[in-house]
Amino acid sequence: MKITKLSDFFVTGDPLIYGADVAIGLTMVAIVVALTAFKRWGWLWREWLTTVDHKRIGIMYVIASLLMLFRGGVDALLMRTQLALPDSMEFLKPDHYNDIFTTHGVIMILFMAMPLMFGLFNLVVPLQIGARDVAFPLLNSLSFWLFFMGAMLFNVSFVIGGSPEAGWLAYPPLSEKMFSPGVGQDFYIWGIQISGIGSLMTGINFIVTILKMRAPGMKLMKMPMFTWSVLSSCLTIILAFPILTVTLALLFIDRYFGAHFFTLDMGGNPMMYINLIWMWGHPEVYIVVLPAFGIFSEIVATFSKKRLFGYGSMVFALMSISVFSFFTWAHHFFTMGSGANVNAFFAVTTMIIAIPTGVKIFNWLFTMYKGKITFELPMLWTMAFIPCFVVGGMTGVMLSVAPADFQFHNSYFLIAHFHQVLIGGVVFGYFAGLYYWWPKVFGFKLNEKLGRWAFWLWNIGFYVCFMPQYVLGLMGMTRRVSSYSWDTGWWSWNFVSTIGGFLMGIGFLFQVWQILHSIKFMKRVKGDPWGGRTLEWSIPSPAPFYNFAITPKVEGRDDWWRRKELAAQGIQDPPPKYEPIHMPKNSGTPIVMSVFWFILGFGFVFDWLWLIIPGAIGIAGTMLYHSFNYDTDYYVTVDEIKKTEAKAGRVV
Amino acid sequence: MAQHHDTHAPHGGDAHESHGSMKSYVLGFVLSLVLTAIPLILVLNDIVTGNAADVVLLVTAVLQFVVQLFFFMHLKEEKKPRYNLMVLLLGLVIVLTIVAGSIWIMKYNMVSH
């Protein structure tokens, strides 16, 4: 793209964007000044940017995803504000509204839910299975940095070049060059492609970790349920993400080389894109929700002080969903006109997949039955999830009735449905998981009182926001409209919905306050603050960098609980005998390579060959450099293990 | 850590696996060459045409795929549990779903052309 004046490059003309420019500039200056003033650059590089420690990578994932939650949330509130004031003032122009609903969707799914999920994988899975790290620690770091650079590439589009505006799945022909000539759509393609490589590698990494690195004695059917859910989610990732990559690559070839896969002319067919993208898109929703099911299973068992009801059926449900999620995709486009047979088939598969999900609900309820339940924050979010997800699931079954879907399709009924399963299932689940494992990660609990405020604001806000949207959908309001006239009668419902949106926003602020407050008035906890059942609670909080001083020997499900029961009977573990621990060394390769990916992506977005070439050379060069780097690991000495364990208050 | 399993980590199930013999590699290579030559000769000399040519191409391609899996990818020698085989079968099911499903769905959309 030829840049002749500044406004070709920077987005201009909107006061909201100028405000964002100033905020971004000031934040960056503040970060640079703070790091320099406190002489923290070296620390940042050594301890965080080059780390291959799964726990630190997990923390970075969580921080990045909470920032993305903030941005996606602000997008949502801007949209709700516009819909509460449809024409009294033009708060968002229609074009700007298109930008915002597109980025809201992409960010919330791909740059908020996915990294928050990967963060929890990283923080928890190696600890749950008694491993010292993931199978490929350097690849893990590369996955994170590719996600991060992809997310940044996507995010700069709103101040540089312009945002994508063809919806979160970028349906052609609208996303083709003919109708979206700007660079926004290219930012979309490259941001998602680069972070998509990272997602795929994370999927592979955790499958190998779970299959190959479990502590001795931990047979598959003795794994904690969260680990099972991660396995099922990763299996779906490695089968689904290549479809996304190929589909977006074809769209890129259309836009960049003028091909005609999905164009309206020259034999292209946009419907093929819709077919392909949902082959990834539908499994994707299961990818993000399966780990949430795993989290709920852990929490319900811990806070009911009982073992999980129906372990086997739970495993079966998780694994069957991860496969069956590939057979329902056409229910996203019943109205495309594929005929009655196709629609009937996919309607039936969609209804069938609701069954294993329902099984899990009963498992959780029976786990709670006659348990000694306590209602700390993780359990509260779990309790809120169950009714919310049941209602969301049932509206999903309503949508799966193909003839009725012609009424619901692309209406606010659909919007309300998928927000209910994604917020009620995924967000509530990840929040529950964060509250649950927070003490394990940081060594202190989050303030209970502020957490309850946040909980109730989120929950009340949720229903106030989305229940009216079901009604709006039945009244005929379609998605992606920035304005409507008064005679539709939609205003009052929209206004109520907006109030709910802001309540959730305040809930988020309470969570930020909760975190800051809990850091300031920190109360240290020991290794096992909740009375946990699985291995991660058997080590100090926060876990030492090598996780387990001695690799645990597992004899049953909920092995830590079993060991605690034995200890209560006076049977003690034999005194530990330490051996040197083999650990991976930190590496700057992942972040450097990811920066080159960013450069390459930025070059492709603007079609600047002078930027594409150095980016590609840099990627190949770092790869080559790493291939010849044999200095990748070291041993932790017994002395250092003893010192670290003593510092964590453990008997040596 | 993963590359160090064999000497250190007591995770088990990761001992050295057989990587084939000279005989099996040569056999695999010859079979691959033969399976490449068959369609080449048949199609270049117009011995088969049309649908028959398609069938020959597809069958030899699938056979070649199987040969490579067994002789070069050592599918048969994998120890239990046979994760590679399981994932391969699942992958095939998914690929079949993608291809057949797309054809089925898109066939009805051809009216729009």
Image (cartoon, rainbow, N blue to C red):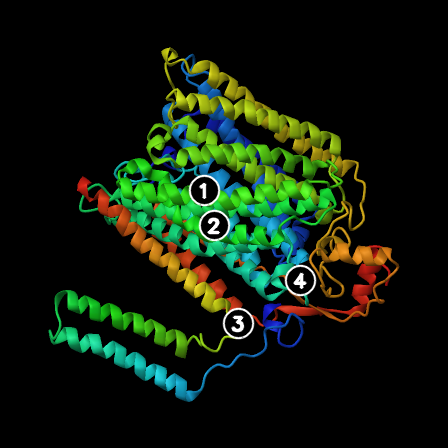
Image disc number at residue A272: none
The answer to whether residue A24 of the structure is visible from this angle is no
- The reply to whether label 1 and label 4 mark residues of one chain is yes
Residue type (three-letter) at the residue carrying disc 3: Phe
* Residue occupied by mark 3: A628
Residue topped by disc 4: A131
Could you tell me which chain the residue with mark 3 belongs to?
A: A
Residue A532 coordinates in the image, percent (x, y):
74, 49
Asked if labels 2 and 1 touch by Cβ distance under 8 angstroms, the answer is yes
Amino acid type assigned to the residue bearing label 1 in the image: Phe
Asked if badge 1 and badge 3 are on a common chain, one would say yes
Instruction: Classify residue A434 by image quadrant.
Output: top right
Q: Is residue A244 left or right of residue A132?
A: left
| Residue type, label 2 | Ser
Identify the mark nearer the N-term, 3 or 4: 4
Q: Which residue lies furthest to the bottom in this view?
A: B23
Residue toward you, A261 or A304 = A304
Q: What element does badge 4 sit on?
A: loop
Question: Mark 3 to mark 2: distance in Å?
Answer: 26 Å
Disc 2 packing (10 Å; few <14; some 14–19; many ≥20): many
Residue A327 picture location, percent across and down: 39, 49
Q: Residue at image x 65%, y 52%?
A: A124
Q: Quadrant of the N terminus of chain A?
A: top left
Tell me which numbered mark, 1 or 2, is placed earlier along the sequence: 1
Rounded to the nearest whole Å, what is the CA distance between mark 1 and mark 3?
Answer: 33 Å
**Mark 3 or mark 4: which is in front?**
4
Check if mark 3 and mark 4 are on a common chain. yes
